[in-house]
Every structure is written in C-alpha cells, then in structure tokens.
Image (cartoon, grey):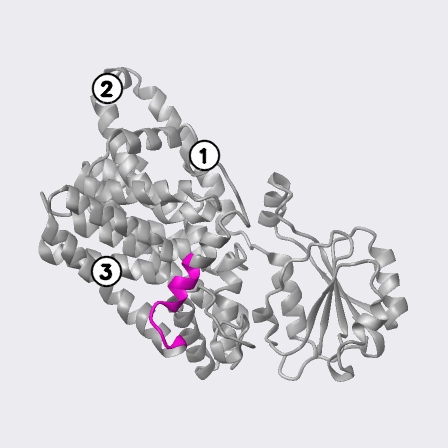
C-alpha cells in the first residue's frame, strides 16, 4: 500500500494514531536518553526528592534543616514532592537502582506529555481543518526536541499539558466558553502555576482576554477556578512548612526581582530568535508570521502573547524558559499560516516551493529526532557517580585546577548524602592541609580529575600530597554533550579520570553494591 494511503487511513482515527506515533520516540527516549539536560531538572528535582526520601535535605530547603533564621528558597514543592512520593514507593517496592528509577520517571513523563499532542491536535482542528490539524499533530508528536525534552524533569515542559488543557477548554465551543469551561480552565491554569510560577503571565492574559470579550462572569469563574489549586497546594503546603501561605511564591518573586541580571541579560528579541531557531527555518518564519498576523482566537492568542511579552521584557532570559508556550505557538502560528497560504494566490502558484520547505524541515527534524532520542546527557558525571556507588567510598575530591569551573555532581547516582564531596580549584592550595580539614574517618579516598589538561602533573601533585594513587577508570562525555560543547564552549564537558588515593587506594567493593 502506498505511504500516502497509510496516512489517509491514519487520519480516519487521528487521535489514536497520533498518540501511538508520539509514544514510540518518547518510550525510546525514556530507556535510551539517560542523564539530565540542565542543572535545574536534576538538582532542583531529583536530588531534592531522593534526599527527602532518604531522610536528608540535599538543598536545605526545609526550615528545620537551615541554620540561623530559616527562610524559604522560592521553589514550588508540588513537583519535587510528587517525586518524593514516587521514590518512597520505589523504596517500599525494593527498587533502589537509580538508573532504573530514572527510567520509571521518564516513562511517566512520556505518558504525561501525550496530553500536549492530543490536545494540540484538538485545538488545531477547532481552528482549521482535518488536514492541517493532522500535520500540526504530527509535528507535536515528532518534532526533534519534543520527545527528548518531554521525558526530562524540566518544569517548563511539565507545565505544558495543563496550559494546553486550559486553552482547549476556552476555545472548544463556538462563542464564549461556558461557565463550567471557564472554571475548569482556571483549575488547569492554577495547576500550571503550582508547577511553574511564571505561568501566571499566561493566566493574566487569559483573564484580560475574557474581560476584553466582555465576559465578566467567565473571568470571575476563571480566577476562582485558578485559586483552588493555588490554595490547596501553594498556600496549604507553605502554611504547614513555614507557618504562612505563599511563602515560597513571595520569596521567588523577591529573589528574581533582585537578581534580574545576575545570570543572563539578553536583548528583548532573544526569545523571537529562539522560536525562529527551534522550529527550523524557513518553516519557523512561517509559524511566527502566522502567529503575529492572526491574533485569534483572542482567548488563546493573548495568553500566549502575554507570556512571550513579559518574558521578553525580563533581562534574565534562558532558552528553556520559553519552552512552556512552544506547542501553542506552533498550533496558533501553524494554523494561521495555513489559512493565509490557502488564500494566497502567490502560494497557490508555488505549491512546489512549500513542499520543498516541508521536505527540508522534516529531513532536518528527523535527523534531530533520532539523535536526541538516543542521547545520554551529562553522561560523564552520571557514570562517574555510578562508579562510586559500587565502591566503599568515604569521601570525594573533585580536582579542577586546570579550568577552575567544576560542575556539581549528582549524588542521586552515588546514593550517599553524608560523605564529603569537596571541590579543589586553586592550584596554589596546600593540598595536605586542605585535606586534613576533614576528620580522618571521613577523609576523601577518591579524586575525580576534570579534563585532561596537564593531567599527569595534577595527578603527581595530588599523589605527592596524599599518598600513592591507583587509576580506577574514566568517564567520557556523551555525543550530545560533545556536540553542544562544540556549538558553544560555554557548555562544559570533560573527561573525568578517577583515582583512588592514599592508604585506601585499593578500594573495596561496597557491600550490596
């Protein structure tokens, strides 16, 4: 049967087939795309949750683990709290292997992300026609970076499904949304805020759109619906932990206002460039043209625009911050572009050109899809910690006197929250005196050397200070990390060379390891 006939038959059951098509690369990514993508999706989620499950508090977020005058750190507790419950359940079930637990976490995220594909198709069908909606659904299912990011612990991505549901509830009926739909849309928007505070800009745009549509009742019901999850999660949890509601949200706002340029200070148009890049030009230009040309339906377009507008005004711009609205930009921009192209006499006379654009887009996209789906991110850091897990290590030194910019190492894979993990970056340090600052029974017996710059000299200097050394192994960066570093050397990756040191340079295998 010709390929076109297969697609025609699939379009007779679009939601089923789009779900299947979307699920395949996501399941593959769950099993084969290990590690973590960025600092926040591991250290602010997985490390925090597992440390709680093990009776610790890795980030010292909880007031009873802080010194002096305890204060909130500005983090929503819902998402790491759900991981805490999952990891406690894993412990009760006897599942303690960190790699296996992360496969489970990624599988759950893969299922959660299917909401984006299914609801995105429904919105596209509401705004266009079955053919256009099918094409948009395929893009949501198979766009190169979406399966890879869908199984990561990024709140920017995890917050997408409730926002998609919010948008669908607002536009699924002709005319104004019903009272029930407005209230349910508010619930979804509130849940998104429980996952990521910044989605308040989306919710603000929704309320404004309802008022501009002269739907005062709908606006009130939307706000009331939004307050339910905010009160049940943010207010109640903070009341229990801190003794006052919205303590974390207040701290988050204050911190970001005080540190608006601390990390990055990018120009206002930075996110437009990001959107132009992630959708693969020249197709991306068509999507952006469609999005800005047709601000309809206002109930969905204005929230997305408002999110983009306020993020563009704020100096601290990291690319992942805008991921939350990427699917809706694709749906709104893609459907608007197709409506424009169908009416354009020039494009009707140049159908072959558009076919060429889409052939190029899918060609590049499939290359990205296959590469990212099987990419193990931060491979060397994870593998180094997994090696430590199988040894009776009482302490670790991370030696980075070459570049003096060491990354954090994921204790989750080590399974040890008590042992010292210290960073040595100053080549002028008296290593013996520095090491003796730690009690003898907790003194480091492993050194992780970052990078291969002047490695023999660094190893010799460490050995002269701490005693005989034995090579344990090396952890190599993965393909994705090497490519990202090649594209932008700011993204650090380095070979990690592992040595056992001193009197315990013949480290035993840990019991149960």
Q: Residues within 10 Å of mark 1 (few under 14, many from 20)?
A: few
Disc 3 is placed on an element classified as helix
**Quadrant the N terminus occupies:** top left
Q: Which residue is mark 3?
A: 226
The image position of residue 134, as x and y in percent, is: 26, 40
Secondary structure state at the residue bearing disc 2: loop
Viewer-nearest residue: 21 or 274: 274
| Magenta stretch encompasses residue 249 | yes
Q: State whether residue 27 is above or below residue 63.
A: above
Front one among 253 and 295: 253
Q: Is residue 297 visible?
A: yes
The residue to which callout 2 is attached is 344
Per the image, is 135 magenta? no
Residue bearing the label numbered 1:
273
Write the residue at 49% across / 49% down: 260
Q: Residue furthest right?
A: 464
Q: Secondary structure at mark 1?
A: helix
| Picture residue at 18% right of the left edge, 52% below the top | 169
Mark 2 vs 1, N-terminal side = 1
Of mark 3 and mark 2, the one earlier in the sequence is 3
Report x, y in % for residue 392.
70, 79
Query: Label 1 vs label 3: CA separation?
Result: 32 Å
Q: Is residue 507 found left or right of 156 in the rendered image? A: right
Mark yes or no: residue 118 visible.
no
Q: Give the main secondary structure of the magenta stretch.
A: helix
- The residue located at (10%, 56%) in the rendering is 179
Nearer the observer: mark 2 or 1; the answer is 1
In the rendered structure, which disc, 1 or 3, sits on the residue that comes first in sequence? 3
CB contact under 8 Å: marks 1 and 3 = no
């Amino acid at each position: 049967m010709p390929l076109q006939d297969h697609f025609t038959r699939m379009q007779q059951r679009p939601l089923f087939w789009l779900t299947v098509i979307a699920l395949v690369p996501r399941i593959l990514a769950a099993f084969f795309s290990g590690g973590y993508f960025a600092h926040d999706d591991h250290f602010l989620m997985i490390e925090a949750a597992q440390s709680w499950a093990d009776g610790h508090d890795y980030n010292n977020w909880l007031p009873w683990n802080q010194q002096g005058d305890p204060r909130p750190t500005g983090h929503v507790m819902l998402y790491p709290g759900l991981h805490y419950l999952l990891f406690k359940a894993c412990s009760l079930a006897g599942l303690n292997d960190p790699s296996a637990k992360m496969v489970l976490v990624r599988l759950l995220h893969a299922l959660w992300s299917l909401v984006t594909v299914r609801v995105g198709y429904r919105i596209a069908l509401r705004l266009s026609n079955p053919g256009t909606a099918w094409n948009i659904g395929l893009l949501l299912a198979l766009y190169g970076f979406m399966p890879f990011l869908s199984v990561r612990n990024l709140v920017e991505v995890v917050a997408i499904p409730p926002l998609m549901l919010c948008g669908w509830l607002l536009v699924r009926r002709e005319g104004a949304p019903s009272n029930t739909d407005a209230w349910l849309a508010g619930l979804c928007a509130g849940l998104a805020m429980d996952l990521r505070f910044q989605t308040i800009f989306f919710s603000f745009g929704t309320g404004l759109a309802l008022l501009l549509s002269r739907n005062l009742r709908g606006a009130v019901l939307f706000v009331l619906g939004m307050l339910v999850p905010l009160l049940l999660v943010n207010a109640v949890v903070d009341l229990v932990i801190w003794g006052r509601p919205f303590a974390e949200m207040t701290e988050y706002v204050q911190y970001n206002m005080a540190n608006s340029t601390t990390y990055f200070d990018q120009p206002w148009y930075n996110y437009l460039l990001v959107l132009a890049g992630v959708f693969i030009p020249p197709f991306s230009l068509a999507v952006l043209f469609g999005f800005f040309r047709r601000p309809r339906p206002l109930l969905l377009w204005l929230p997305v625009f408002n999110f983009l507008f306020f993020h563009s005004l704020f100096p601290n711009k990291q690319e992942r911050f805008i991921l939350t609205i990427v699917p809706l930009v694709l749906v709104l921009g893609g459907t608007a572009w197709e409506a424009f192209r169908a009416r354009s006499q020039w494009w009707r006379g140049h159908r072959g050109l558009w076919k060429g654009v889409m052939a190029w887009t899918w060609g590049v996209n499939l290359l990205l899809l296959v590469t990212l789906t099987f990419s193990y991110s931060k491979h060397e850091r994870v593998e180094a910690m997994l090696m430590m897990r199988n040894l009776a290590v009482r302490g670790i030194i991370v030696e980075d006197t070459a570049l003096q910019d060491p990354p954090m190492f994921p204790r989750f894979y080590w399974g040890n929250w008590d042992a010292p993990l210290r960073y040595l970056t100053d080549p002028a340090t008296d290593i013996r005196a520095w090491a003796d600052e730690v009690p003898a029974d907790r003194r480091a017996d492993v050194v992780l050397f970052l990078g291969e710059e002047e490695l023999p000299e660094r190893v010799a200097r460490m050995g002269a200070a701490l005693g005989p050394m034995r090579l344990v192994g090396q952890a190599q960066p993965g393909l994705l990390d090497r490519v990202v570093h090649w594209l932008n050397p700011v993204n650090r990756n380095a070979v990690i060379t592992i040595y056992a040191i001193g009197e315990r340079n013949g480290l035993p295998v840990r019991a149960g390891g």
